[in-house]
Amino acid sequence: MIDLISPLRIVIIYVILGIAWIYFSDTILLLLLPESTGRYLTQIQHYKGAAFILLSAGVLLLLLKRYWARLEASEKAYSRMFETSPQPMWIYDRSTYEFIEVNDAALYTYGYSREEFLQLTILDIRPTEDIRQLMSSQVTTKEGYNKAGTWRHVRKNKTIMYVNVQAYGTNFQGKNAEVVCVWDVTDKYLADQALQEQKGILSTIINSTQDLIWSVDRSKRFLAFNEAFHSIINNLYGIYLEVGHPQPAVESEEQFAKWQKIYDRSLDGEKVVMMEERNLPEVGQIFTETTFNPIFQDDKVVGVACFARDVTETKQRQIELKKAVERYDMVNLATNDAIWDWDLVLNKVVWNNNVQTLFGYNYLIDEDSRWKDHLHPEDAERVIESVYKAIYDGSTHWSAEFRFLRSDKTYRYVHARSYILQNAEGKSIRMIGSMRDIQDRKMQDEEIRKLSLVASLTANPVIILDAEGRIEWVNKSFELLSGYQLEDISGERPASFLHGEKTDMDTVAYIHKCIDNGKHCKVEVLNYSQWGEPYWVLTDITPVVNSEGNVERCVTIQTDITEKKKFEQQLEETNKHLMEVAYISSHRLRRPVASLLGVLAIYDKENMGNPENKELIGFIDKLTQEMDAMLHELADKCNQIYLNTHPQESEANGENTGVEN
């Protein structure tokens, strides 16, 4: 204000004094010299003008001295403000970019001496890569105040700092200059940058998950939310969320009130975990777990941070695990096997109660893997090697047969099998298995082995079936009799290829019934060979039953009785013919003989010419022909009986061989 008002004030005072001098001086002269001559008046006017000049010059000098004194004081004040300002300041020439003046704060901040600083330009304190941008900004800079924003500056020691720049365009020492004031905002800028990076990272994190993340303030208005939360609210309810919006009542009043109560509990400082089951359209049943965490600021709850995730898979696994545990418990109750659960990470083995029942051990938890010490010395290396090979090779199943030591120091053959669980990296972490006592089966196998050795040398056909009634083994005699080879019928059921149209199905049903009940049976069966020829066998079937009463195998020994059955059929045929001969002899032949005797009794032997005798002779002739026919039939029957009892002669001599009539 001094630069504008003081010169104007001087001019106004000078004008007022000049006008007052002219007016009042002329008036006074007229009053004092009314009769003066013109010449005398002119001289007085000259003296008056000179006096005015001298007087006004003195007044101007006084006023100017006061103005310049005030201006000098003001400049000194501004100079002290510039030099003593705690903020770095300088003045530079806008045409050459050279520094004209600099304060102590700038020297301290940038690390230069005054002489060094005044030899620099504003380009020298900028990173090289920022100079192009600086030059562009200088072109658009206007006169007066300019807020240049945040820039990077370089100290003398080459370190970078971030400064906020404010400038004022002015004329200084006759130059188009600019006064610049800077604030070191390096810490704030880096903190803001770090904060922005953290916000970016946080945004990336919360938006990289399909879990729902959001937060509300004490008024239950949204503070923040991730894209997954916004998307599901938008898709399900058609609501476009924005920060500051209240929690929408998108569900039933009861459900909405429930959520409000949970928010209130969390706003009171309580962490709440809520599990919900929902049925979503086109999705089905899902389970969600939502966590409500109080947000504290200065020991006060200012909001709630919420995290919801889909735990359907986990819940389903829990349900399946519960079912599996229930099945495991049921298996424990239903089986006689010793079941173990080996934690491969902790090297701890847990057994069920059957380990005591079968082997006499009263421990259920084996922390030292003592099962290795119970292996028979001849089996130990093989079994341990196979176990660890399955574990380290990533196999899911393992099984073996070996001898296991009981508490009474005796060994029993066992069959062990297990399932190996692996983690996400494919590393085996758990082994669950069962162990069954197969000592009796081993003894039976040994007996069967011996029996098989004997059966392979016997002339009788032998068949060994498994527990399902399928062929495991047949001997050579069976192959010769039936024509079927073991490799062709292994795994087949005998009834599928041995029985034919004339096989008695009642006999077959009786055989199956005996086998199912584990009972011995001995029956005659009509079988058919590979070539379709029937043959009879006497089948002796013995089921092999284990300690639990279940049929494990079935041994069948057959005897070829085809010739016997043929002989029996011949005897039956011969007996049939003999019965017919006897019937002809005792019944049919007796009738014409009796009739002939009756005719002869009434024949008139005394009177041969009796006309009745002629009729009786015709009747006798008829009876005689009947008797002759019967005798021929009787001869045929006897011939058939002879052929049945002498088949070899029938084959040698042809069908015409027989008894002469």
Image: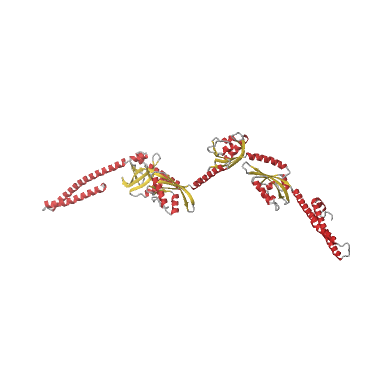
Of residues 623 and 2, the one drawn nearer to the viewer in this rendering:
623
Q: Residue furthest bottom?
A: 611
Image side of residue 84 versus residue 392, left or right: left
Of residues 253 and 644, the one drawn nearer to the viewer in this rendering:
644
Image side of residue 42 versus residue 84, left or right: left
Of residues 566 and 354, the one drawn nearer to the viewer in this rendering:
566
Where is residue 82 shown, x and y percent of the image?
31, 42
Q: Residue furthest top?
A: 409
Q: Residue furthest front?
A: 606
Where is residue 359 shown, x and y percent of the image?
59, 37
Where is residue 497 shown, x and y percent of the image?
69, 50
Quarter location, residue 429:
top right
Image side of residue 454 versus residue 308, left or right: right
Image side of residue 616 versus residue 283, left or right: right
Of residues 75 and 86, the one drawn nearer to the viewer in this rendering:
86
Examine the rendering and report whether any part of residue 40 can be seen. no
Quarter location, residue 551:
top right
Give the colour scheme shown: secondary structure
Where is residue 427 shown, x and y percent of the image?
54, 41
Number of marks = 0
Examine the rendering and report whether any part of residue 601 can be seen. yes
**Residue plotted at (66% across, 48% down):** 512
In the rendered image, the quadrant that contains the C terminus is bottom right
